[in-house]
Amino acid sequence: MAKCDICGKGVTFGIAVSHSHRRSNRSWKPNVKKVNAIVNGSKKKINVCTRCLRSNKVERAV
């Protein structure tokens, strides 16, 4: 689902606490984009988080 193929960043879970301190489960999802990238010399669609895109850890295919 929401998982980066480069760094492995995925969904993290925690507890949301409201103003009245009622607690409920929630999840934080990374900002993952489906990108055409060059992997092992060939063009492939992979899921990449925007942090990896911004730091040029992946070479985009045009």
Image: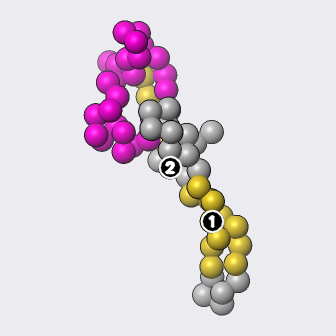
For disc 1, the neighbor class at 10 Å (few under 14, some 14 to 19, many from 20) is: few
Q: Which quadrant of the structure image shows residue 26? A: bottom right
Q: Name which quarter of the figure residue 37 lies in.
A: top left
Q: Is residue 30 magenta?
A: no
User: Measured from the top left, where is residue 27 in percent x and y?
Assistant: 62, 59
* Residue 9 x/y as whole percent: 50, 44
**What secondary structure is marked by label 2?**
loop
Specify start and end residues of the magenta stretch as a single range. Answer: 37-62
Q: How are the residues colored?
A: secondary structure
Residue 39 is one of the magenta-drawn residues: yes
| Crowdedness near tag 2: few (<14), some (14–19) or many (≥20) residues, C-alpha within 10 Å | some
Residue shown at the point (45%, 38%) measured from the top left: 7
Residue at far front of view: 7
Tell me which amino acid carries mark 2. Pro
Above or below residue 53? Residue 10 is below
Quarter of the image that includes the C terminus: top left
Determine contact: label 1, label 2, CB under 8 Å.
no
Quarter holding the N terminus is top right
Q: In screen coordinates, is 3 left or right of 21?
A: left
Residue corresponding to mark 1: 14
Question: Percent from the top left, x then y, of residue 3?
Answer: 55, 40
- Disc nearest the viewer among 1 and 2: 1
**Does residue 54 appear in the picture of this structure?**
yes
Tally the numbered discs: 2
Q: Amino acid at mark 1?
A: Gly
Q: How far, Cα to Cα, is label 1 from label 2?
A: 14 Å
**View extreme (top): residue:** 41
Name above or below for residue 10 compared with residue 20: above
